[in-house]
């Protein structure tokens, strides 16, 4: 576990860590060996880091009334698509095509970060994040997570906080 801050960032980071460094946000990078056979990227990350699944958040891309929208929810639960649509003033939401999500964000499935995306998308962070001092989200590739304050994540992604996760 390597602490990274504005002065400690090494060249060659992911777009997510580059964005965090450019913003001057304090964060911690967690790296682990990704097992392609594991059934859940998020649960694998929680297990590998020894962190409660309630503090590890997955990044999902959905289509809300024709607009790609990022949802950040705890890996311990699932995304409530109706709640996501309501959070952004939409009517209907469905999971986005994985290839479209990858092309739009610049990340591969299982490594999509809410930070440093190729195209900034509307973002909704599950309000359970505010119950934690820090949360973990993908740092932009499988086997790499970044831990940061939920307020910093919300600010950098211009996220709306809303109850979009289901246990």
Image: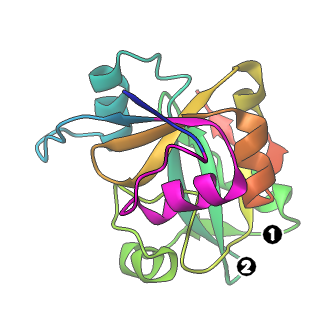
Quick one: 123 or 88, which is closer to the camera?
A: 123
Say above or below: 59 vs 165.
below
- Using residue 90 as the reference point, say whether residue 135 is left or right of it: left
Q: Can residue 130 be seen in this view?
A: yes
What segment is highlighted magenta in the picture? 6-28
Say which residue label 2 marks: 65
Circles 1 and 2 in contact, beta carbons < 8 Å: yes
112 is higher (above) or lower (below) than 154: below
Residue at label 1? 91
Q: Quadrant of residue 132?
A: top right
Marker disc for residue 3: none
Few, some or many residues within 10 Å of mark 1 (<14, 14–19, 20+): some
Q: In which quarter of the image is the C terminus?
A: top right
Q: Quadrant of the N terminus?
A: top left
Element type at mark 1 = loop
Tell me which corner region of the image, top left, top right, bottom left or bottom right, holds residue 64. Answer: bottom right
Quadrant for residue 141, please give it: bottom left
Q: In this view, does 63 lie to the left or right of 8?
A: right
Disc nearer the start of the sequence (1/2): 2
Q: Is residue 80 above or below residue 128?
A: below
Write the residue at 40% across / 61% down. 11
Task: Give me the residue at 34% from left, 32% from top.
Answer: 45
- Place of residue 150 in the rendered image (x, y in percent of width and height, measured from the top left): 71, 35
Foreground residue, 138 or 92?
Answer: 138
């Amino acid at each position: 576990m390597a602490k990274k801050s504005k002065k400690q960032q090494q060249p060659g980071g992911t777009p997510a860590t580059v964005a965090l460094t450019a913003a001057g946000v304090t964060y911690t990078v967690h790296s682990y060996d990704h097992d392609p056979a594991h059934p859940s990227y998020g649960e694998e990350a929680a297990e590998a880091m020894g962190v409660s699944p309630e503090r590890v958040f997955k990044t999902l891309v959905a289509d809300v009334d024709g607009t790609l929208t990022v949802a950040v929810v705890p890996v311990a639960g699932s995304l409530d698509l109706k709640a996501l649509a309501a959070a952004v003033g939409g009517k209907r939401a469905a999971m986005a095509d994985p290839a479209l999500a990858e092309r739009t964000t610049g990340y591969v499935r299982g490594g999509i970060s809410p930070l440093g995306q190729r195209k900034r998308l509307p973002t909704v962070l599950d309000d359970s994040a505010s119950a934690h001092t820090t949360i973990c989200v993908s740092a932009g590739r499988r086997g790499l997570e970044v831990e940061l304050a939920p307020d910093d994540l919300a600010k950098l992604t211009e996220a709306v906080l809303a109850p979009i996760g289901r246990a």
